[in-house]
Amino acid sequence: MKMNGARILCESLLREGVDTIFGYPGGVVIPLYDILPEFPGLRHILVRHEQAAGHAAEGYARALGKVGVCLATSGPGATNLVTAIADAHMDSVPIVAITGQVPTTGIGRDFFQEIDTTGITLPITKHNYLVRNVSDLARTIKEAFYIASTGRPGPVLVDIPKDVFVSEASFLYPDTIDIPGYKPTTSGNMRQVRQAIEVLKEAKRPLILAGHGVVISRAFDELKAFADRAGIPVMVTLHGLGGYPCSHPLYFGMIGMHGHAHTNLAIQEADLLIGIGMRFDDRVTGKLSTFAPKAKIIHIDIDPAEISKNVKCTVPIVGDIKTVLAALNAETPELAHHDWVNQIEAWRADRRTPQQHPVDDAQPIPSTMPIKEIYRRTREPVVVVADVGQHQMWAAQEFPYDDPATFISSGGLGTMGFCLPAAMGAKVARPEAIVWAIVGDGGFQMTIQELATLQEERIPVKIAIINNGGLGMVRQWQDLFYDKNYVAVKMWQPDFVKICEGYGIPAKHIERARDVGAAVDWALATEGPVLINFKVAAEENVFPMIPAGLGLDDMVEGHQPKTLQLT
Amino acid sequence: MIEYSNRPITPHTLVALMQDHPGVLNRVASLFRQRGFNIESLTVSRTDVQDISRMTIVVDGNTTNVEQVIKQLYKLIEVTKVTELTHEPHLSRELALIKVSTSGNRRPEILQLVEVCNAVVADIGADSVTVEVSGDRERIDSVAGILRPFGIKEIVRTGLIAMVRAAN
């Protein structure tokens, strides 16, 4: 059957199981928007800035484990997507970004709203396409979804010139795919699996470092089975949160720059690290030369390029985490490391924050308190979407994630402004879950315009601003490493409650500790999008901390953020 | 006067086969730039298989992690095969044109050397001759070295092409 490119695109999206597009129209994509109402199965969510469309697609993808789709016009539409595409690239998030392009005859002539979109996005996509011929469109969409969602996932961009939307071709959606240069390895090499087990059997002080790959591969049960079977303590990276239940006795917290202190001690003492779906990035290892000096390393990852990129690995296993762990589980004997587990438990107990006095009304709200109250009062299923900065680290440290894939944040790129649109995408993906957007006052204002989208589409995201009056993490670095020379970190504060009033979104301003719990309850009971602005202490630091460029041994434990006696 | 740099490198020769899609050279070049891989030379040409291009890439193993280069190349969707030839018996050839000054009536001397070196005179001008030489890197370096005292006005090298030797 012959149809135009716009319809071919929509038909193809439906065949890929797409139900939602986060988009923003403009000149060259009007032919696509023209026929969009013919496809009620494709819900279009009109964002207020293309960057938000990208982050919303990421939030959707991460909450559901399914490809997210965003759409923008050529030129500024495409460049506005760039930050979100880069974010998805760094965090291995499967999204397909569709951009309009000027007509093929105009390409290269500096046409109105022309930009070299595939050129710009080349280093920040897993792959990208410029579709010059409508007869290539269906196959290209098929390949785009396949590449985005398989192997190590990532963003794929498809740039479609205006004339391709309106020219016709016969529509035949391909059943199969043949990309000669793209055959991701999924099952681990059995010889290496067995070699890993041999190394594991000799280890006295092994640790599992579980990362985003566990969540992406949905390998929750397999990881639990492996850790239980081999009796190995589990620690997670920022993106590994929600990959292993925090309530499990073998769970020992988060590693890295702001990881729990005992995890970094354990890494330095371990004789074997098993990195599972993580990439030993600098925020995890600190200075490489002093990282885990006593440890052999088993590294399991789907991306061969991650093996021995940062740390020299003893046994690499390239493959999908779920498949490799299943293979390991089938052959790993039952092991136990009681002394080692007890040792880490003792380190943890040593460093448990002393309970502190209840805060009186004269004192500001401790920064972690709203996060703890949100945890205490929110029933599952819950998804926490954090922005970037101090509140993000507190949300990672203080919220005990038990359900799979309950934590979403921008890790690799550290994109402020990620939270609100990503939370929107997560809530659209998982309407049954309570979605909390935990965000700083800085990052919130970077994508604050999405309050309109939340309201218009009635997407009931619960927003908690952890408001310390500025850029807390930058201030923390200036405090610790720049002699308290605070520059460009204090921010004039708008009245967030009034802003919400303008959007018709219920909101509360909370500045007394005793009101925190009730405010959380109020937000939980309120229908539709809702916001609480928690005015918290202005100058708290996130500890522990491994100063950038230093090693795990140089961890600064500092004064722990004050905590409350919760009643 | 062109001085050909002779700083020591540890050349690693890679051959990559890839689908000949628009922009694929850009992808390879962008990858090298982005990751800070140092390219000593890069040549690209068609193969006798339709839509498959062949690149010979020489990287300096002293400054670049060759294993990462190979793995990162494989991450490009169009790249189908990457082979490192460094440790295999292989043939490698490079072509160079070297324009040498003949001032001071030294043309006969130069022509004699060209003949001894088994090189070819490609062009003769009023005050220069252009020498064509092909061979592996060392041979080109050596001919360029011999001609340098006469004054090299211009030199161009194609970059290396390489191929595994046939089994005996």
Image: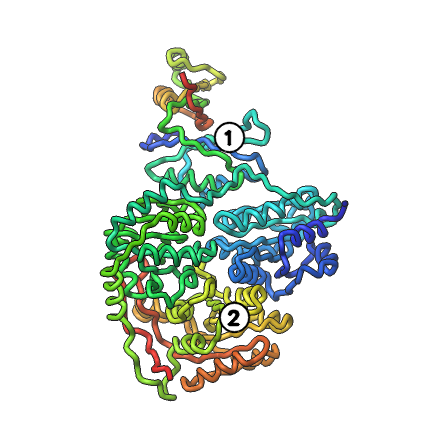
Say what amino acid the circle numbered 2 marks. Val
At a point 73% along the width and 61% down the height, the residue shown is: A37
Farthest residue, direction bottom: A361
Q: In the rendered view, would you say B7 is above or below A159? A: above
Q: Which colour scheme is used?
A: rainbow
At a point 44% along the width and 80% down the height, the residue shown is: A535
Residue sitting nearer the eye, A272 or B113: A272
Q: In the rendered view, would you say A430 is above or below B70? A: below
Screen quadrant of the C terminus of chain B: top left
At a point 30% along the width and 81% down the height, the residue shown is: A356
Residue on which disc 1 sits = B54
* One can see residue A179 in this view: yes
Residue on which disc 2 sits = A435
Distance of mark 1 from mark 2, alpha carbons?
50 Å
Asked if badge 1 and badge 2 are on a common chain, one would say: no
Q: What element carries label 2?
A: strand
Residue A53 x %, y %: 58, 61
Q: What element carries label 1?
A: strand
Q: In the rendered view, would you say A452 is above or below A264? A: below
Q: Which quadrant of the structure image shows residue A264?
A: bottom left
Eye-nearest disc, 1 or 2? 2
Say what amino acid the circle numbered 1 marks. Arg
Question: In the rendered structure, the residue with mark 2 lies on which chain?
Answer: A
Q: Which quadrant of the structure image shows residue A213?
A: bottom left
